[in-house]
Amino acid sequence: MFIDGIAGMTLSNNVLRIKLARIDASGETSTEDLFLPASNINNFVNALVEGVNGLNEQLEANTTEESNGKGKGKGKDKDSKKASLSDVDEKK
């Protein structure tokens, strides 16, 4: 499932309901719901955080390799900022 954002969420009857928004092929926004038992919310969020931290470490390692001339990025500016998941959309 690909999502473009979170349109809303609510906790009711011990179930977290997250409305996930996405733009379909015709350019229209559509939503789908993700349901999580309240007892699993912490585990779910912690797993996401750990996953994002792991990806950021991989991106940082790749950036370090490129700046040391070991990667594909030879000749890149030394002043370029560190890569992180927060700026992936900015790169094209």
Image: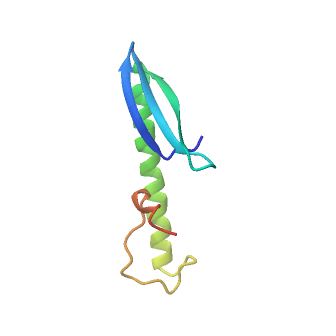
Q: From the viewer's perspective, tell me whether residue 42 is left or right of residue 74.
A: left
> Going by the picture, which residue comes out furthest to the top?
13
Q: Which of the 4 image quarters holds residue 77? A: bottom left
Residue at left offset 48%, top offset 54%: 55
Q: Which percent across, then down, holds residue 62? A: 50, 67
Q: Which of the 4 image quarters holds residue 81? A: bottom left
Q: Which of the 4 image quarters holds residue 79? A: bottom left
Residue at left offset 57%, top offset 44%: 2
In the depicted view, which residue is nearer to us: 47 or 26? 26
Where 14 sits versus 10, above or below? above
Where 68 sits versus 82, above or below? below
Where 62 sits versus 32, above or below? below
Q: Which percent across, then down, holds residue 1? A: 60, 40
In the depicted view, which residue is nearer to us: 1 or 62? 1
Residue at left offset 49%, top offset 59%: 58
| Count of numbered badges drawn on the protein | 0
Residue at left offset 51%, top offset 82%: 69
